Amino acid sequence: MHGHNEDVHFSSSSTRINPESSLLANLQSCSKTLSSHLSNTRLSLTRMLDSLKTRHASPRVKNTRRHDSPTQMLGSVTQLMIGSKSPLLSLSLIQSISSDFGAESDAATTGISSSPLLCCASLSLNRPSESSTQSVVEGKEAIQQQQQQVQKGHSSATTSRNAEERVLISEVLVRTKDGEELERKDLEVEALAALKACRANSALTVREVQEDVHRIIESGYFCSCTPVAVDTRDGIRLMFQVEPNQEFRGLVCENANVLPSKFIQEAFQDGFGKVINIKRLEEAITSINSWYMERGLFGIVSDVDTLSGGIVRLQVAEAEVNNISIRFLDRKTGEPTKGKTRVETILRQLTTKKGQVYSMLQGKRDVDTVLAMGIMEDVSIIPQPAGDSGKVDLIMNCVERPSGGFSAGGGISSGITSGPLSGLIGSFAYSHRNIFGRNQKFNVSLERGQIDSIFRINYTDPWIEGDDKRTSRSIMVQNSRTPGNLVHGNQPDNGSLTIGRVTAGIEYSRPFRPKWSGTAGLIFQHAGARDEQGNPIIKDFYSSPLTASGKTHDDTLLAKFESIYTGSGDHGSTMFAFNMEQGLPVLPEWLFFTRVNARTRKGIHIGPASFLFSLSGGRVVGNFSPHEAFAIGGTNSVRGYEEGAVGSGRSYIVGSGEVSFPMRGPVEGVLFTDYGTDLGSGHTVPGDPAGARLKPGSGYGYGFGVRVDSPLGPLRLEYAFNDKHTGRFHFGVGQRT
């Protein structure tokens, strides 16, 4: 065995299976072709005819035989030898003549017991060689010439009529090719069970005998079968001389580099020590081919040999990748063009490599990976044969998208719920998706609302050059202003405050296990509160501090680590995320704290309904800014409450359960319930902003809603009641976080 299967050595007459033929068709090459011995055939047939006439006239023979004319008998036997018109059939006539066969009186005296063997019809299921075919053709021509002489003075029956002539068979036996009984009676039973027409005391035609010969071969246990008709005093005895296949003693599998040896063992182990059955062998080969097909691999059993000693040799053809080339196509004309993306940038994304057995499933994943780069409009892989090497060349056709441009849009901030236009946001952005042809991305964006705003510059390298772990790097600078009502809202003077943050940082991300990814980064943040006029403030209306340092701004250097398990990636699939942030007091006035946050989600499908359960929780230890406390309540927390209205604390837990069901088209209905609590940690936040605003610290909500799939993501419209029986609408875009 070659490749990775050197530990497999099972180890059958020389059965050879061509890759383009079926197994049973190739079985025809297992039999032996008898040569045609037709020298002096004219004299032999004349004497046979005279012998048949003499015995036919004898009273003894007359009492034991049916009244078939010699011409009819000879015509039937000749048709048995000639057989059908298939080029796979070859026959030979063998005549045994007594040395003292000239005297008719001796034949009459000795009777049938001393009569010679009438004939032996050998049916061979081999595709004859050129010389064998020529011999058979010459034999047929000689037989036809001699038959014309024998049939002089008798009725001129046609060949088709003789083919339908029935001959009475008194006995049917299965013997070896030497005429002996088979050593294994179970094989004799299998051969007799395969017969359909040939039964003792039955009248048979040539065609019926031929069909039963095929049935014996197709049983799978025999490599050749020769029907032999012998005249006895009780009638014609029909013997099927068979040659059984060898016993299965071992297996040699060649060129199977990716096929597991254990799978080969399991496919053939039931037949070990038994007579090779071609049908079972075909099933095993089919299972191997199915293994390749199920995995999308270009592999197949190309050849099978049964060698002496009961050894089966399998030859497997696995198409390895010879070369991978990238071809860019014009997005309008479809003609080849010069691309902007570097070829090595695309090739490094592919998991298919040179020398691997090509897998269509792996190729599809590679296409999805290239499309996920965001710089291609269409991608396809075309495999082509690499000459006569048995390998394949892969051509990846790529249609590039425009690499950059300006965009503008709008949206709604779910965190802003007061005021008729306070939730509306406008945006403007410039982006370039493919800097230097390396798939590096640069983005400048501005989002502006009535209260909040975000200006952001971001540079991302999705795969750092020279790294083999698919590590990405992102550099970010951001200036944002967001409402502070999540923690410090509901002021009696109806005043509002905003939290301003200037942030800069760098993050590295990469997958480290299947479905798992990790992110680590270092972020600096300069944050403080401002009133409606934009003036810095350090306390709210309740005299609760707005910073931890007592100054107008808090400075923090954060070391960040995050790990995410995404399951299948669908919203209803299992998800788990763990996030930790550590404040590093590089300078004495910088904040020092540890924040841990985790969330998980699990979906279950029962009939048309889908159940989704989610749970999140977190804890902060150390000296941190009050506005960084965990806020509970709102569209993405406990529905039925305003944003942050349940509480804000150092710790929290929020759980949610919902069931969704299809309604019509892209619209589905949903029933839900939420619960959240700060675990009694509200008063531990500096200034106790939750206690000053009489937030309950825990609460639940329940309700119903509809969701509509859209190009922007699911559009969610929900109505919920809280535990104070107050109803509230919630609108959101995208899945709940």
Image (spheres, helix red, strand yellow):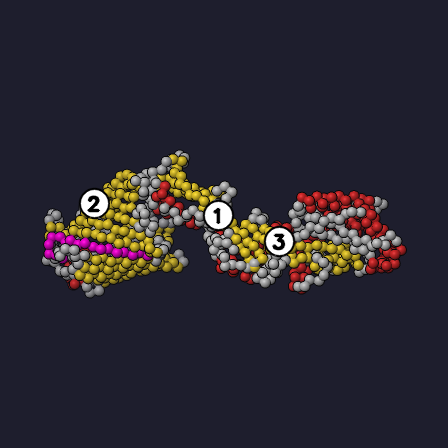
Q: Is residue 451 above or below residue 168?
A: above
* Residue 15 placement (x, y as % from top left): 61, 53
- Residue at point 62% right, 52% down? 27
Residue 610 seen anywhere in this rendered image of the structure: yes
Q: Quadrant of the C terminus?
A: bottom left
* Amino acid marked by disc 3: Ser
- Residue at point 32% right, 47% down? 466
Answer with left or right where residue 467 lies relative to residue 113: left
Look at the image and say whether residue 716 sits in the magenta stretch. Answer: no
**Reading the chain from its start, which is encountered first: label 2 or label 3?**
3
* Amino acid marked by disc 2: Phe
- Residue at point 11% right, 47% down? 533
Q: CA distance from mark 2 to mark 3?
A: 79 Å
* Residue 399 placement (x, y as % from top left): 38, 39
Label at residue 319: 1
Tag 2 residue: 455
Query: Would you identify the image quadrant in which residue 586 lies?
Result: bottom left
Callouts 2 and 1 close, C-beta under 8 Å: no
Query: Which residue is farthest right?
Result: 105
Residue stretch rendered in magenta on the structure = 547-565
Callouts 2 and 3 close, C-beta under 8 Å: no
* Residue 493 placement (x, y as % from top left): 11, 53
Is residue 480 or residue 122 the one in the foreground?
122
Tag 3 residue: 14
- Residue at point 19% right, 64% down? 681
